[in-house]
Amino acid sequence: MRTAIYIHFPFCLKKCLYCDFDSSARRELAPPEYVALLLKEMELRQAQLAEPAGSATLYFGGGTPSLMAPELVGRLIDAAAARFGLASGAEVTLEANPGTLSPEKLAGYRTAGVNRISLGIQSFEDRLLSRLGRVHTAGEAIAAFEAARRAGFDNISIDLMHSLPEQSLRQWREALARAIALGAEHVSAYALSVEEGTPFAALLAAGKLPLPEEEEAARMFEATVQLLSEAGYRQYEISNFARPGRHSRHNGVYWRRQSYLGFGAGAHSFLNLDGLGRRWKNDVDPTRYAQAIRRGVLPEEEPEQLTLEQAVSESFFLGLRLLDGLDLARLESRFGGQALAPHVAEAARLEASGALIREGSSIRLAPGMVIVANSVFSRFL
């Protein structure tokens, strides 16, 4: 059974004002205690699987996984290799907040087996970082990148955000230029999304969050594609750009509906052994998660066996996120022509309108539609 591995570390130094992820600045569990629970969960999950697993990617997400000491990360990597067949050449990514790193820590992560660092830089301007509630400065972000290089990381991804409060197109172009100058192998460039229940949502409702106009945000997206493409990055997914061969193999698992096992409080899992898929999530509360694991119980919630209709819909709206698109012939062999027919008809309508491009049995977003991709995806829900 081929499956990716995701490990969730839900704790942060400080909760960012825009964040709606399963994370918290409260430390109900110390990192060594939490890692011991993760190791126990891995043991329980391995015993529950019907067949041995083989894994080509491991991703530490959060939260702020870089709050863990390198030796703890190493124990988890070793456990993933022993219990889920993590390959020797696997892509092992650790999300890191620049404000939590040091040269010694980065060297330790590299020795432990991490070979890809994802730096949550978000902005190269201290004013914007403060507005977002980040705990690092622009100087610390650049220093962390340079320290990662010295530690031996030749695969570094950086996260940047545009359409921030009072951010101009000029400022965004300067941020992209700084990322290019650093020489990151991968850039994830996202528009700010104001999510319900966050402090930013309350500020927006109160008229205290001056966001760029839609036209300005659109120009920022267009500048992203232009500048990164001119610098040799390939846009392989709506918000993700990579040097040749440096795309995120782990995230590709999600977009292609392949299997992944999630560990930790709030982690999600998806096993696609029957072509349709079954998903579940872990209890998001670290205390309840810990109680379940200590009882020898997997803390699964919201189990769902997908229907044929759900699986087909997901294949379209996830597959079309990739700029290469998807292969209708392959989907038909997997799901059957009858199940695919309504979506193929919708794809034909979108092709006639210029929203999709079809080449043989493959369909993909037309270049001009990438900026409004969600309106296309919604047609397949």
Image (tube, helix red, strand yellow):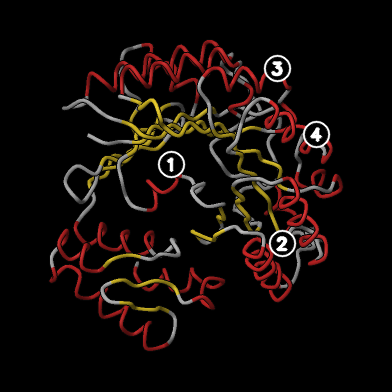
Q: Which residue has dot 2 on it?
A: 163
Quarter holding the C terminus is bottom left
Amino acid type assigned to the residue bearing label 3 in the image: Glu
**In-front residue for pair 235/32:** 235
Q: CA distance from mark 1 to mark 4?
A: 27 Å
Query: Would you place residue 277 above or below residue 69 in this image?
Result: below
Q: CA distance from mark 2 to mark 3?
A: 35 Å
Q: Residue at x 28, y 66 (%)?
A: 327
Of discs 2 and 1, which sits in the foreground? Answer: 1
Q: Secondary structure at mark 3?
A: helix
In this orientation, does residue 302 appear?
no
Q: Which residue has dot 1 on it?
A: 250
Amino acid type assigned to the residue bearing label 2 in the image: Ser
Give coordinates of residue 359: x percent, y percent: 33, 77
Q: Which residue has dot 3 on it?
A: 104
Of discs 4 and 3, which sits in the foreground? Answer: 3
Q: CA distance from mark 1 to mark 3?
A: 26 Å
Choose the circle earlier in sequence order: 2 or 3. 3
Please tell me in which quadrant of the rendered image residue 138 appears: top right
Disc 3 crowd rating (10 Å Cα; few below 14, some 14-19, many 20+) is few
Q: CA distance from mark 4 to mark 3?
A: 15 Å
Q: Residue at x 41, y 88 (%)?
A: 353
Q: Which residue has dot 4 on it?
A: 140
Amino acid type assigned to the residue bearing label 1 in the image: His
Choose the circle earlier in sequence order: 4 or 3. 3
Disc 2 crowd rating (10 Å Cα; few below 14, some 14-19, many 20+) is many
In this orientation, does residue 352 appear?
yes
Give coordinates of residue 6: x percent, y percent: 43, 33
